[in-house]
Image: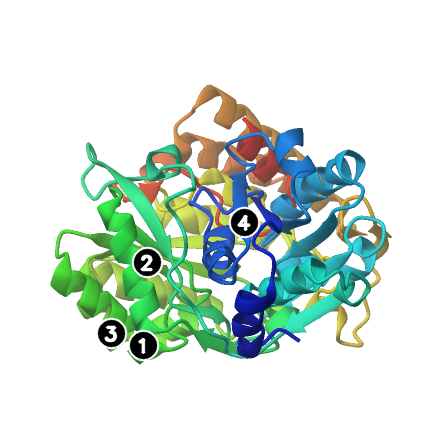
C-alpha cells in the first residue's frame, strides 16, 4: 500500500529520466484535478511527468511511446469507456509500458481491467500510490507493481500542478450570476470519499462510508492559483460539502475574505440540507449561488431501495429551504430504475415543470440506473428478477424494467433529449415534450396546459450539464461533440 514514506524514499532513489504520462479522460468539463494532484507529487518525487486531457486534446503516439508508466484517470463511467480505448492503443504503441487505470470506476471494474487492459488498478486515495508504483517501475520491480491497489487512509497532499494543463478558458464556464455574465470556472476538492452509503453511488463500494479532508492550506493554495489564472467561480467537487462541515465552511469563509467577488457551487445531500439549514444563509452570503443535490426520485419506494436517506417530502422541503436562502438547487435524478413506476416518472416531470423548470437540464430526465460490477446494489441478498447478464464491453449489468412501457419510454426520452441537444431547443420546451411522452405512454390525458405550470426565472449554471454518473448514452455523445 502506498504511504507517505514512499514519497521521500523515491525522491532520493528514482532516476530522473523516468517518464510518467498522466491521462485524464473526462472530469465533467473541469480542468482535471485527478491528474493535476498526482502530477505535483510525482514531480516532487523526481519523475519526468507529462499530462494530456483527452477530452480536449488527442493522446498522440509520441507521448505514449516515450512513457514508462501510463496512468489513466477514470473517475466516472464515461471516462472509463474512453480510457479503455486509450489503454488498448497504448498497449499497441508501447508494449513495454506499464498501464495503470485509477479512480472510482477503475476500482469497480478491477477484475475486468487487470490483465486484459491494465497492469495495475488503483482505487481510493491515489496520489501516493502512483508515486510508489512509479518508484517500483524505475527500480525495475515491475512484477510487484502489478495488481490491484486500494488505499483508504489519509495521505499527504501538495498543491496540484495546473500550469501545464490546458487553460481554464477551454473548460466549462459559469453562465451567471447575472443572465448576461460569463465566468471562468476553477475546481477544488476540500474532501474525498463520503460518510454516506447510497447503494447506487460509485463512491460507496470504494470508500465504504469513509471520507478524508484535504488540508485547508492545500485547498486554498489550489484555489488561489486558479483565481490567478482567471477563475471567478469555483466548483467544489466534494461528494458532500457538508460531510466535514466545519472544515468546508472555514475554506469558504477564507476564500470570501480574500476574494469577496468569487462565487462558488457545492454538492450537498438532501438530508444535510435539512440538518444544516441554518448554514444556508451564510453560504449565500459567502458567494454560493447554486448547489447540486441528488434528489434522484420523489418515490419513497425508490429512495428506500437506493438507501438515499431522505423522502420525497424531504426533497420538496430542500427546494423550499434553498430558495428562501437565495441559493438555486440544481437536482440530479436517476429517473429510470427497476422500481420506478410510470406514475413516479410523471411526478418528476410535473415537479420539475412546476417548481424547477430552469434548474434542471433535460438530460437528467434520461438518466437510467447504471449497475457496474462492484456496485453496492449487488451486495444485498434481495430478489432481482429484473437483473440481466454483465455486459463486459459496457462495464455494467443489463437490466429490464418489469413494466416494458418504462423501457420504451426511456428510449423515447433519449431521442427527445438528443434531438433537442442538436437543435439547441429551450430546456423547458424539451421537458414539456418528455412530460407529454410520459402521459401518452401511460394512456393518460395531459392535464391542462403545461406552460401554465412553469415559473421562469434565471438560474446560474455551468455550461457543462452532465454532473451525474449513469449510463453513458447522452453523456458520451455530449462529451465527444
How many residues crowd mark 2 within 10 Å: few (<14), some (14–19), many (20+)?
many
Would you say 288 lies left or right of 430 here?
Answer: left
Measuring 22% from the left and 53% from the top, which residue is drawn there? 263
- How many marks do you count on the picture? 4
Q: Which of marks 4 and 1 is nearer the N terminus?
A: 4
Task: Tell me, yes or no, whether the two marked residues, 1 and 3, touch with CB atoms within 8 Å.
Answer: yes
Label for residue 250?
Answer: 3
Task: Tell me, yes or no, whether the two marked residues, 4 and 2, touch with CB atoms within 8 Å.
Answer: no
Measuring 28% from the left and 44% from the top, which residue is drawn there? 460
Given residues 291 and 455, the one toward you in this image is 291
Would you say 194 lies left or right of 339 here?
Answer: left
Residue 306 at what x, y percent from top left? 62, 68
Would you say 345 lies left or right of 243 here?
Answer: right
Q: Residue 429 falls in which quadrant of the image?
A: top left
Q: Earlier in the sequence, mark 2 or mark 3?
A: 2
Given residues 349 and 152, the one toward you in this image is 152
Residue 446 at what x, y percent from top left? 50, 37
Q: Residue 124 falls in which quadrant of the image?
A: bottom right
Q: What element carries label 1?
A: helix
Circle 2 is placed at which residue position? 222
How many residues crowd mark 1 within 10 Å: few (<14), some (14–19), many (20+)?
some
Label for residue 247?
Answer: 1
Task: Tell me, yes or no, whether the two marked residues, 4 and 1, touch with CB atoms within 8 Å.
Answer: no
Residue 43 at what x, y percent from top left? 49, 56
> Comparing marks 4 and 1, which lies closer to the viewer?
4
How many residues crowd mark 3 within 10 Å: few (<14), some (14–19), many (20+)?
few
Q: Is mark 2 on a helix, strand or loop?
A: helix
How many residues crowd mark 4 within 10 Å: few (<14), some (14–19), many (20+)?
some
Marks 2 and 1 sit apart, C-alpha to C-alpha, by: 16 Å
> Comparing marks 2 and 1, which lies closer to the viewer?
2
> Comparing marks 2 and 3, which lies closer to the viewer?
2
Label for residue 48?
Answer: 4
Amino acid at each position: 500500500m502506498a504511504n507517505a514514506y514512499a514519497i521521500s524514499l523515491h525522491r532520493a532513489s528514482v532516476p530522473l529520466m523516468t517518464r510518467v504520462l498522466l491521462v485524464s479522460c473526462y472530469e465533467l468539463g473541469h480542468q482535471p484535478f485527478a491528474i493535476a494532484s498526482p502530477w505535483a507529487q510525482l514531480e516532487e518525487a523526481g519523475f519526468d511527468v507529462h499530462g494530456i486531457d483527452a477530452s480536449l486534446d488527442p493522446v498522440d503516439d509520441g507521448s505514449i511511446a516515450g512513457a514508462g508508466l501510463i496512468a489513466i484517470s477514470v473517475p466516472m463511467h464515461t471516462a472509463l469507456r474512453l480510457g479503455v480505448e486509450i489503454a488498448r492503443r497504448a498497449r499497441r504503441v508501447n508494449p513495454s509500458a506499464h498501464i495503470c487505470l485509477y479512480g472510482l470506476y477503475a476500482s469497480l471494474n478491477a477484475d475486468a481491467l487487470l490483465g486484459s487492459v491494465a497492469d495495475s488498478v488503483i482505487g481510493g486515495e491515489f496520489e501516493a500510490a502512483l508515486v510508489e508504483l512509479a518508484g517500483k517501475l524505475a527500480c525495475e520491480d515491475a512484477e510487484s507493481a502489478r495488481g490491484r491497489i486500494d488505499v483508504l487512509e489519509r495521505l499527504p497532499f501538495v498543491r496540484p500542478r495546473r500550469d501545464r494543463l490546458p487553460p481554464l478558458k477551454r473548460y466549462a464556464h459559469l453562465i451567471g450570476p447575472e443572465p448576461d455574465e460569463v465566468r471562468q470556472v476553477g475546481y477544488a476538492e476540500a474532501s474525498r470519499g463520503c460518510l454516506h452509503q447510497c447503494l447506487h453511488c460509485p463512491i460507496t463500494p470504494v470508500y465504504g462510508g469513509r471520507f478524508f479532508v484535504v488540508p485547508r492550506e492545500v485547498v486554498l493554495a489550489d484555489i488561489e492559483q486558479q483565481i490567478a489564472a482567471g477563475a471567478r467561480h469555483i466548483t467544489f467537487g466534494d461528494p458532500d460539502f457538508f460531510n466535514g462541515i466545519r472544515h468546508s465552511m472555514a475554506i469558504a469563509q477564507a476564500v470570501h475574505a480574500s476574494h469577496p467577488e468569487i462565487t462558488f457551487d457545492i454538492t450537498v445531500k438532501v438530508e444535510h440540507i435539512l440538518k444544516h439549514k441554518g448554514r444556508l444563509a451564510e453560504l449565500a452570503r459567502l458567494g454560493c449561488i447554486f448547489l447540486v443535490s441528488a434528489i434522484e426520485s420523489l418515490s419513497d419506494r425508490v429512495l428506500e431501495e437506493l438507501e438515499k436517506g431522505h423522502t420525497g417530502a424531504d426533497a420538496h422541503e430542500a427546494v423550499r429551504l434553498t430558495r428562501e436562502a437565495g441559493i438555486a438547487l440544481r437536482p440530479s435524478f436517476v429517473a429510470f430504475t427497476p422500481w420506478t413506476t410510470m406514475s413516479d416518472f410523471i411526478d418528476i416531470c410535473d415537479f420539475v415543470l412546476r417548481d424547477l423548470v430552469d434548474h434542471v437540464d433535460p438530460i437528467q430526465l434520461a438518466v437510467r440506473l447504471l449497475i457496474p460490477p462492484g456496485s453496492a446494489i449487488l451486495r444485498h441478498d434481495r430478489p432481482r428478477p429484473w437483473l440481466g447478464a454483465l455486459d463486459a464491453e459496457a462495464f455494467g449489468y443489463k437490466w429490464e424494467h418489469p413494466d416494458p412501457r418504462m423501457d420504451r419510454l426511456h428510449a423515447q426520452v433519449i431521442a427527445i433529449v438528443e434531438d433537442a441537444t442538436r437543435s439547441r431547443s429551450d430546456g423547458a420546451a424539451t421537458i414539456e415534450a418528455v412530460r407529454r411522452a410520459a402521459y401518452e405512454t401511460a394512456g393518460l390525458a395531459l392535464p391542462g396546459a403545461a406552460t401554465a405550470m412553469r415559473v421562469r426565472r434565471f438560474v446560474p449554471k455551468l455550461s457543462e450539464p452532465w454532473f451525474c454518473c449513469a449510463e453513458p448514452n447522452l453523456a458520451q455523445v455530449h462529451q465527444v461533440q
